[in-house]
Image: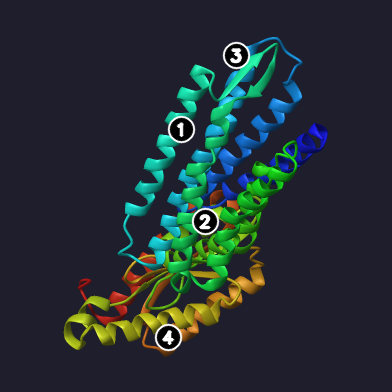
């Protein structure tokens, strides 16, 4: 029978290890949000390993101290699991009910801490178990170690029943599995004392919770992070990439890429804002953005500041890019030269130099604009 228990413990431990690895993958926000669930899994994993070790080492080593420590942990791990799960429940309920306090959690913490003290005293005095010749033998106090865990479990089941509508019946039932399963396993142990599978039952419950609840939490958190990341790189006015998005585009360029760069700056945006209002200025910005997108449909168009745009076209073939430049020049002339531009092509390894070259040519184009329009200075 001990071989069955050891096999079940180690198999469940392997599945929990996979769950732990999956729980640590993701953003910092995700790792933080799932921390209390992970604490439950860690303790359950340690319980499984300790339980398996107690069977494997029983009677096979002469170090009574090691056997004593293993058995002591196997007793207190139940209380540690309940405490961690109480904090996990608090986190789940708190997300739905902002007024939910930690009073209930501290109640569970208090009674389980008292049980740990009881177990510690029983272990030191030999009233809980004794170890001789590498084997542990349970004593009279062992019958009382499940009383407080039973009270804590029933209390949490009642809490889930009360908060069931708030959490959703499905979630409440799934969360109850973790509490009901050890009780069910405990009932089996009353029939067959050798079949100690409490930690296996807890592990199965944690895996079910991960599949039904935590996987959804992970998916929702990752989706929010993805949306936030997208919005943080998007210019709200034009829908183009902003300066942060531009930095991502630059960093993604490979040295072997043949790229084309356009640097464009709106002419007289400040006087337009001053004389006609920012709504008029916004329309000009959107017009220039639209012209750049239409001229370079294969390029990444970025608004890097109020009136400045950069276009990066990867794998730029000379003919395709030149056609885009001609389309841009024509469109700007048809719109009263509302923007100046400069462009350059070259290897991705010198992308920053190409941007500077295009910017310098843009300033030359802008100076020509002032000369042609008779303006003596840039306002």
Cα distance between the residues tagged 4 and 3: 89 Å
**Which residue lies under the disc numbered 4?**
333
Camera-nearest label, 4 or 2: 2
Marks 3/1 in contact by CB < 8 Å: the verdict is no
Cα distance between the residues tagged 3 and 1: 19 Å
Is residue 242 visible in the rendered image? The answer is no
Cα distance between the residues tagged 1 and 2: 58 Å
Residue at image location 36% in from the left, 80% down from the top: 285
Is residue 11 visible in the rendered image? The answer is yes
Mark number for residue 116? 1
**Which residue lies under the disc numbered 2?**
250
**Counting residues from the N terminus, which is met first, the one under dot 1 or under dot 4?**
1
**Counting residues from the N terminus, which is met first, the one under dot 1 or under dot 2?**
1
Cα distance between the residues tagged 4 and 2: 29 Å
Residue 219 in percent (x, y) is at: 57, 63
Horizontally, is 53 left or right of 87 in the view? right
């Amino acid at each position: 029978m001990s071989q069955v228990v050891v096999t079940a413990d180690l198999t469940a431990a392997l599945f929990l290890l996979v769950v732990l690895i999956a729980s640590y993958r993701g953003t910092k926000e995700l790792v933080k949000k799932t921390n209390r669930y992970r604490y439950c899994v860690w303790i359950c994993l340690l319980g499984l390993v300790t339980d398996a070790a107690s069977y494997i080492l029983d009677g096979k080593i002469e170090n009574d101290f090691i056997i004593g420590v293993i058995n002591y942990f196997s007793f207190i791990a139940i209380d540690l699991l309940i405490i961690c799960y109480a904090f996990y429940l608090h986190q789940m309920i708190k997300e739905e009910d902002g007024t939910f306090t930690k009073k209930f959690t501290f109640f569970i913490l208090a009674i389980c801490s008292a049980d740990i003290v009881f177990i510690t005293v029983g272990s030191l005095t030999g009233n809980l178990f004794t170890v001789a010749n590498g084997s542990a033998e349970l004593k009279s106090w062992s019958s009382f170690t499940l009383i407080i865990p039973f009270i804590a479990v029933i209390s949490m089941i009642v809490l889930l029943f009360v908060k069931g509508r708030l959490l959703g019946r499905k979630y409440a039932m799934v969360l109850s599995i973790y509490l009901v399963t050890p009780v069910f396993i405990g009932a089996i142990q009353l029939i067959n004392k050798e079949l100690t599978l409490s930690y296996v039952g807890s592990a199965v419950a944690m895996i079910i919770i991960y599949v039904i609840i935590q996987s959804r939490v992970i998916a929702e958190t990752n989706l929010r992070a993805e949306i936030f990341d997208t919005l943080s790189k998007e210019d709200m006015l034009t829908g183009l990439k902003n300066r942060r998005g531009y930095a991502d585009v630059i960093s993604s360029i490979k040295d072997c890429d043949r790229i084309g760069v356009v640097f464009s700056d709106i002419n007289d945006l400040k006087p337009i804002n001053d004389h006609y209002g920012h709504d008029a200025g916004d329309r000009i910005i959107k017009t220039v953005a639209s012209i750049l997108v239409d001229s370079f449909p294969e390029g990444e168009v970025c608004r890097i500041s109020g009136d400045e745009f950069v276009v990066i076209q990867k794998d730029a073939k000379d003919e395709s890019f030149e056609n885009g430049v001609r389309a841009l020049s024509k469109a700007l002339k048809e719109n009263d030269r509302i923007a100046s531009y400069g462009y350059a092509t070259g290897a991705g390894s010198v992308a920053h130099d190409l941007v500077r070259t295009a910017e310098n040519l843009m300033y030359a184009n802008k100076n020509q604009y002032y000369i042609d329009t008779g303006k003596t200075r840039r306002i």
